[in-house]
Image (cartoon, rainbow, N blue to C red):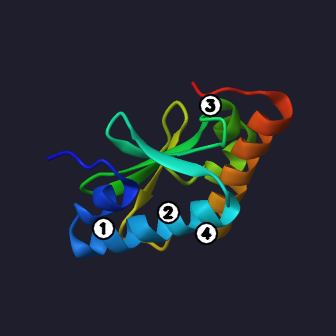
Amino acid sequence: MKPTTVNEYINSFPDNQKARLTELHEIIKSVLPGTNEAIKWGNPAITDKDGMILVVFAGYKQHINLVVTPSTKQALESELANYKTGKGSVQFSYEHPLPTELIKKMVAYRAKEYRENGVRWM
């Protein structure tokens, strides 16, 4: 059965991955209090009060993906140089501590670009 909530999604992973996904979820929510969450395309999505997606994250066997927007990724490109990235995603290995301050910066930038400049989801 597919998860219908973020907690169900996180709890579907093995303990070591579940702990890291929970940590990432808590970091995101600390930067975006008062936002909503949903499952979009099978993955946890944090949305603004109006339903606009701000960030998405996903667990995989070897890593976690944090998905923002290409413009957010580009704005922090120099700080993301040591990470594998995609169009708007950044991969974090389960084997290394999450870069809390970098994640907070990415999430805050994404929220600001939407709220102040109207940059919509991809």
Q: Say which label, 4 or 3, has the lower sequence index.
A: 3
Numbered label attached to residue 25? 2
Q: Say which label, 1 or 2, has the lower sequence index.
A: 1
Q: Is residue 58 left or right of residue 30?
A: left
Q: Which amino acid is tagged 4?
A: Thr
Q: CA distance from mark 1 to mark 2?
A: 12 Å
Whether residues under marks 1 and 3 lie with C-beta atoms below 8 angstroms apart, the answer is no
Q: CA distance from mark 4 to mark 3?
A: 20 Å
Q: Is residue 70 left or right of residue 44?
A: right
At horizontal 30% and vertical 47% (from top left) the residue drawn is 4
At horizontal 69% and vertical 32% (from top left) the residue drawn is 71
| Residue 59 visible in the current orientation | yes
Q: What residue is shown with label 4? A: 100
Q: What residue is shown with label 3? A: 70
Decide: is 8 above or below 47.
Answer: below
Whether residues under marks 2 and 4 lie with C-beta atoms below 8 angstroms apart, the answer is no
Q: CA distance from mark 1 to mark 4?
A: 16 Å
Q: Please provide percent x and percent y for residue 102.
A: 66, 61
Which secondary structure, mark 3? helix
